Amino acid sequence: MAERPDFPKMEEGVLAFWKEHDIFKKTLKKPAPRGDFVFFDGPPTANGRPGIHHVESRAYKDIIPRYKTMRGYHVDRKAGWDTHGLPVELEVEKKLGISGKQQIESLKGTPRESVAYFNQLCKESVWTYLEDWDRLTRRIGFWLDLEHPYITYQNEYIESLWWIVKQIHERGLLYKDYKVVPYCARCGTPLSSHELALGYDEAEDPSIYIKFKVKGHERTSFLVWTTTPWTLPGNVALAVGEDVAYVKVKQGEEYLILAKTRLSVLEGDYDVVEEYTGEDLVRWEYEPLYSFVPVEARAHYVALANFVSVEDGTGIVHTAVMYGAEDFELGKTLGLPKQHLVDLKGQFIPEVKPWAGMFVKDADPKIIDELRGRGLLYRAETIRHTYPFCWRCKTPLLYYAKESWFVRMSELREELESANGTINWVPSYIKEGRFGDWLHEVKDWAFSRERYWGTPLPVWVCEGCGTQKVVGSFADFPENPSHNTYLILRHGEALQNVKQLVTNHVDAPYHLTEKGKVQVTEALAKLKANGGIDVIFASPAIRTQETAAIISAAFDIPVTYDERLVDVSFGVYEGKTIAQYNAYFSERIDRFRRAPEGGETLTDVSRRMYAFWKEIDAKYQRKRILIVGHGDPFMMFEATSRGLSASGVIDYEAHTYIQRGELRELTFRQLPYTDDGIVDPHKPYIDDIAFACERCGGAMRRVPDVIDVWFDSGSMPLAQWHYPFEAQQKIDRGEAFPADYICEAVDQTRGWFYTLLAVSVLLGRAAPYKNVICLGHVLDKEGKKMSKSLGNVVDPFEMVSKYGADAVRWYMYTINQPGDAKLFDEVDLDRVIKRVFMILWNTLAFWKLYAPTQGSPVKVQGSTIRHIMDQWMLSRLNTLVKTVTERLDAYDVTVAGRAIADFIDDLSTWYIRRSRDRFRDGSTEATGTLAHVLGTVAKLMAPFTPFVAESLHKELSAFSSQLSESVHLESWPEAGEIDAALLAQMAVVRKAAELGHAIRDEQKIRVRQPLAECEFASPGITIRPELLLILASELNVKTAHSVSHIEERDNYAVRSLGGLTVALALAITPELKREGWTREIVRHLNELRKEAGLTIALRIEVYYETSDAELAELFVASANVIERGALARGVHAGRGGAGHEFSIDGVRVWIGIEKVA
């Protein structure tokens, strides 16, 4: 064991050990007497590199499942990947050097081809940094099932999402409406309220006061304030408050009307000439600022509104119904004209001639100048305020009236708040604060997005009568118009099956075995019993020819052979064993992505099977068609009929692969097929699906929108298991729902935390999670947000490589509470190593010096321990076990971690320091106690620092055959007896020792100089005699006394703190002085031993030289003490060995040592 281990290198060794021995999988298979503990992994998107903040979230995600596993629970840890949405689309646009929807739809020959190409790039883009994410996940010890993740773009996942949408629709909660929504002109799509909340930032905007001239009142204007000058061309009304008092003031030669309480906005002197109520001003008309388009209804008058505020502005609100939610509702109530002057690109339409084609925010200064030129601008300033920006592209959002799909979350406010009431939030204030406030003000969910790469909204609308149909599964799609019935029959057993060989050569001489012929005959009987067949197609291979021949003869139907039905082309593995062929692929998914030389992928197989089916389906109508073929081609053929993704095919292969001689009936529906015959429910393929309206016979076509990407991740509790099509009991019985624990950053109160709850409540379920830790953000050491532009981004791989994953993990757990922002400074990682890991490692090294060389360490039983330090240590340990268990049960990770750190410090600086002589004397009670303590600490640290804990466990395992293969396979320790009185008394003794050391410092008396006595007074506490001996030893005094009262007196120094008083005798007798000199000599000798690299097993000879007679005599008189303290064989006058000169109380002496051969 290295004295100063390279922790990162040590961790790499642990990773190799875990991999070689499948430790993670073994933890999933270990007995779980407490049942299931459910954990949900919030899915990241792998199109960007992971950052240091991802280490924070993944560390917190990992600790609780590890802890619960050791506590006797089974914890599934399914990884997940969020793969849709604007983040992915914008990254692809950036790579292509394009911007906006128009350029996306012009990438290829047609918009459909362009969208197909763009979405394929998006699909590939989400895996750009998958290797980095997987590497970081594994490297930091986050145990996650990365082999079977849920992926939000997969067919099965989307099918579950569609099912959920259908349930929402059937509850009457999905609706289409025309209303003002937050809209990103750059991305061309509306955003939801929770997305809106993610994008607020500080911004400077105009703050202007405009004069609206009142009709019929000469030189009189309404004074109006706005921060969005671009909305002024769309003004159609002014709003006043019913209970607001207004005044008319005279300034110079003009009159202004505004709220009485807002007179402070006026510049210069004025006279109030008249007062009004809001009701008095209703229906007053004013001259429109602009008349770019004719209005379609009455406009440009004053109306009452309940949203008018006098906190700012003038108490008169400019109303542009197309660009404000409250304005729009007022417009609906009053019948105000609804006309857009801004297009979907956020640019003024041609009719707005001065600024046509200009982005509206860019037009603000020009509009202000134009108003100034006409004398309508009263005052212009700038204001710094929070403004919403697109959470992905950072474009300023516009409030814009348009048609969109919504979910009625506002109707479920009570259910949402009730569900939130059952959740344990860490920090607790999130519950009623940030999250509770959000739910109380919940808005309807703007559900649809006018984008491309996302889950398609499964709503079809009849072009004739407007009937809506929501598709909730692939089975909801109509059957194929041909109405053919497809029966597939895999050939019977053939010789190559017996020999376990692979071949697709049609002339390979592998005939049916007798068993194979029986299998075909059994299939024939089923065909006869179930309606027969009309047509037979078969692969031209010998084994399929012979199979088809048996069926053909029985029905007297000719066989058509088709090369597209042959088995997979195995390339260079043709004729080799199945095992050899399978060994070419590191994982089953590779069969879709790569093929051996000369072979084909499963995607290639799917393409030819699909081409075959399309051809014969167009040729035949209402026929029963038998196809005789092979296992893998049929696997892909069935995937085509059922809409399976690649992962679905892998699951099919494992559980429902067609057997030799097996007959199956397939149902083909109108599904969204790619040209390769792969079912892809994304755009543009889903938009190809049209079917007849059941009500009027008209064509039903899908609405073009996709769904808000946050719905994808919010539905993961069900969709990750393909619910309800699979794993229904797993969910409904509570085995996988709700989550016992989730964890993400605090901004997810507007994101994943909210949509999880929203989806669950929409389905009439309880809260989808019971306990949640909200994490504060990781900032740089100056408190600034990390960004590439500032150059303050921290590379997590660099930190892990330099300090180790455990150091980063421990920092994240203990630097502050999880909800607080972390000002990351790598200096803190170095402190973790020095103040926690190295202390623990040195403790282990110390134990190994005295541990038994073989066999099991002494088993510690608290009742048999005699020494007071061991008794205290075990009580201290049991207190730690109790504290860490209670705190982790309460999801209080920080306090639990800090308790461990405090304990490690106590273990080293008190227990070991006060027990060194016992270890040197060979006390098995001491070594057994310390072994037990270290083993327990390894278990307690395992969830926090899995690498250090494993290494510590491994070191201890060398001395015991009773320990598990891995610390992570151990059970969590149980707290034993706690002697509270002993702990309290020891605390007093340690405090007395601190005061005693403080006195020595004040008096400049080194600790190695013995003193006569120490007295201390601690009213109400009786100290055991053994503890007085420990205090005396610690303070290096001959005796320690507990007294009732201490008074100041000569040759004593006194110090008090918190009711405790300590006095030290200061007089140093010649005997005490000589003893102090002896200790100084021993200290220097041990330093020489250390410099020479000598272990405790090696002995030395000591040499000395001094001109001081008293000191020379001391070497002779105290030789035995020196030999014992320095592990020496003898003490000799004169120079010898290696040494140096030093002084004791001003007396010079040279000492040297020489190793005994």
Image (cartoon, rainbow, N blue to C red):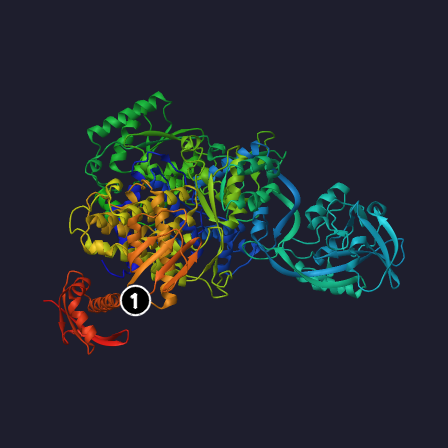
Q: Which residue is mark 1?
A: 1068
Residue 991 location in percent, x, y? 38, 55
Residue 565, located in which quarter of the rendered image?
top left
Q: Is residue 152 visible?
A: no
Image coordinates of residue 1059 in percent, x first then y, are 44, 53
Which residue: 47% across, 66% down? 791
Identify the residue shown where x is 59% and y is 52%.
188
Quadrant for the C terminus in the image: bottom left
Residue at the extreme bottom of the image, as rendered: 1107
Q: Considering the numbered disc 1 on the image, is that residue within a helix, a strand or a loop?
A: loop
Left/right placement of residue 59 relative to residue 426 reads left
Q: Quadrant of the N terminus?
A: bottom left
Q: Please state which of residues 685 and 718 is positioned toward the viewer in this rendering.
A: 718
The three-letter code of the residue at mark 1 reads Ile
Give coordinates of residue 765: x percent, y percent.
51, 33
- Viewer-closest of 296 and 1024: 1024
Question: Residue 204 location in percent, x, y?
Answer: 65, 61
Number of callouts in the render? 1
Residue 132 in the image: above or below residue 156:
below
Placement of 194 over or under 1094, stated as above or below = above
Question: Which image quarter: residue 832?
Answer: bottom left
